[in-house]
């Protein structure tokens, strides 16, 4: 159900922008909706190609940019400039990011909603609210150094 809702909302966004939801974009959105944790563009590209879709990495980045702009995704900046993405929760969230294994935990805190309200009181229009906390999780082995790749996507969002 979540996958269908996400794809339908994406279809609406692309249609509103004068474009259409191509079969490749539709499958890309379905793969995004099925993600259980944060993902990067390269992981997403690899995943959609496993499904036999012929899409360039630049096509993936364009689709991610559209979904970010529409508020469907939240971008999380990790250690070393790594860009990860999660499906937006529709509310203000705090993302706790492990610098070593890249595990990401999302939590809601009503204080962020209050801060967004304060920004409005000061004359700002708030498009979204998120906060990142860079940390190292207790479950990381001491020997992990740098940024691990595939095996590191064990976060919960």
Image (cartoon, rainbow, N blue to C red):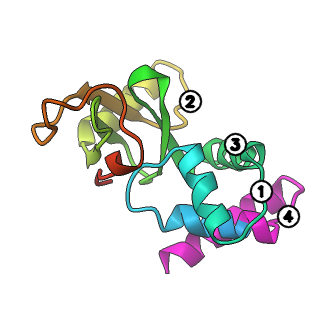
Spatial CA distance of label 3 from label 4 is: 17 Å
Q: Nearer the viewer, residue 123 or 137?
A: 137
Question: Residue 55: which numbered mark, if any?
Answer: 1
Q: Residues within 10 Å of mark 3 (few under 14, many from 20)?
A: some
The residue located at (77%, 56%) in the rendering is: 55
Q: Which mark is residue 125?
A: 2
Nearer to us of marks 2 and 3 is: 3
- Can you say whether 46 is above or below 69 in the image? below
Real-space Cα distance between discs 2 and 3? 26 Å
User: Which of pointers 1 and 4 indicates the residue nearer the eye?
Assistant: 1
Contact (CB < 8 A) between labels 3 and 4?
Answer: no
Q: Is residue 154 magenta?
A: no
* Vertical position of residue 66 compared to residue 137: above or below: below
Name which residue lies at 55% across and 61% down.
Answer: 32
Reading the image, the residue beneath label 4 is 20
**N-terminal label among 3 and 4:** 4
Q: Extreme bottom residue here?
A: 1
Residue nearest the viewer, comparing 66 with 100 = 100
In primary-sequence order, the first of circles 2 and 3 is 3
Picture quadrant of residue 46: bottom right
Q: Which residues are magenta?
A: 1-25
Residue pushed farthest top? 122
Question: Which is closer to the viewer, label 3 or label 1?
Answer: 1
The residues tagged by marks 3 and 1 sit, at their Cα atoms, a distance apart of 10 Å
Residue linked to disc 3: 61
The mark nearer the N terminus, 1 or 2, is: 1
In this rendered view, identify the residue nearer to me: 130 or 46.
46
């Amino acid at each position: 159900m979540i996958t269908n809702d996400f794809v339908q909302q994406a279809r609406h966004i692309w249609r509103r922008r004068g474009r259409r939801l191509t079969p490749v974009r539709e499958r890309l959105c379905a793969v995004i909706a099925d993600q259980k944790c944060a993902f990067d563009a390269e992981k997403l590209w690899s995943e959609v190609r496993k499904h036999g879709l012929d899409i360039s990495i630049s096509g993936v980045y364009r689709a991610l940019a559209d979904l970010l702009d529409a508020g469907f995704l939240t971008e999380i900046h990790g250690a070393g400039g790594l860009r990860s993405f999660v499906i937006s929760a529709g509310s203000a969230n705090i993302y706790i990011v492990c610098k070593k294994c890249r595990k990401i935990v999302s939590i809601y805190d009503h204080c962020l909603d209050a801060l967004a309200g304060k920004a409005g009181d000061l004359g700002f229009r708030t498009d979204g609210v998120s906060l990142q906390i860079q940390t190292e999780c207790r479950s990381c082995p001491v020997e992990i150094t740098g940024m691990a790749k595939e095996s590191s996507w064990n976060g919960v969002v």
